[in-house]
Image (cartoon, coloured by chain):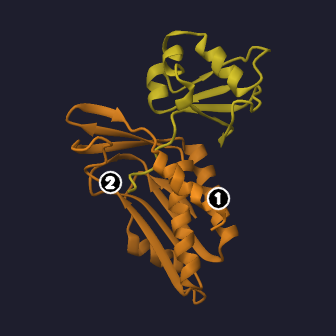
Amino acid sequence: MIRVQREDFDIGAEIEALTGGNDQIGAVASFVGITRADAGEDAGDAVSAMTLEHYPAMTEKQLSDIEAEACRRWELTASLIVHRYGRLEPGDRIVLVVTAAAHRRAALDACAFLIDWLKTKAPFWKREETADGDRWVAARAADDRAAERWHSGS
Amino acid sequence: MTLLYFAWVRERIGRDSEEVALPADVRTVAALLDWLRSRGGGYASALEDLSVIRVAVNQEFAAPDHAVAEGDEIALFPPVTGGALP
């Protein structure tokens, strides 16, 4: 399941809604991304807030494709991606990935896969607010490498 | 054809979308970018360095040789930066 929204989310309520009552689930893995104050690429730059812009039609499509790929690779009982957009301040939750399976390995690996692919495939752009003004954040090669490792069939 | 612009590409071009009629000889993503750049001004500025431009045709990432046609929704944007993940 995919949701892209401006509003915050409640982690416990989301996990309960996704997995509650399903006695086939033995393992639930979750990842929560939080806005950092030092998100800037240049050390020492304090980020007071950031705004996430996205391309709604493509975001839905890409996230659905990524989720479908995870379900092909692992035996998942349920999965959820919630991604926020709009203005976020340090400490704000920004993304939630939940994967549920019969056993822990599938849940943990699928969760890591989803979050790595989100970073490189989902059309989001970050604009940071700093004391020196606003700036768009450039893509990081490290994120591409994190996603690439899933190509090697590991 | 609908063109959509995001992030600093949108800011440099000065609009977030537009409808354009495609010249007959523009049949690929690369040709479309060349044609847009030839319009000058904000287009030339936004498309100055194509290594930092990504293109999606009908919501899918598309390579320079990908075909474009009337009726397509084509988006131009910088490489995606995802969420605020460590």
Q: Is residue A58 visible?
A: yes
Which residue in the structure is indicated by mark 1? A151
- Chain B colour as displayed: yellow
Mark seen at residue A39: none
Q: Is residue A38 above or below residue B38?
A: below
Mark 2 vs 1, N-terminal side: 2
The one nearer the camera, A85 or A137, is A137
Q: Kindly indicate the quadrant of the structure image that contains residue B68.
A: top right
Tell me the element at label 1: helix
Q: Is residue A14 above or below residue B8?
A: below
Query: Disc 1 marks which amino acid?
Result: His
Mark 1 chain: A
Task: Name the residue at 70% across, 68% down.
Answer: A72
Q: Kindly indicate the quadrant of the structure image that contains residue A24.
A: bottom right
Callout 1 crowding tier (Cα within 10 Å): few <14, some 14–19, many ≥20: few
* Distance in Å between CA atoms under marks 2 and 1: 28 Å
Q: Is residue A100 above or below residue B9?
A: below
Task: Name the residue at 58% across, 55% down.
Answer: A148
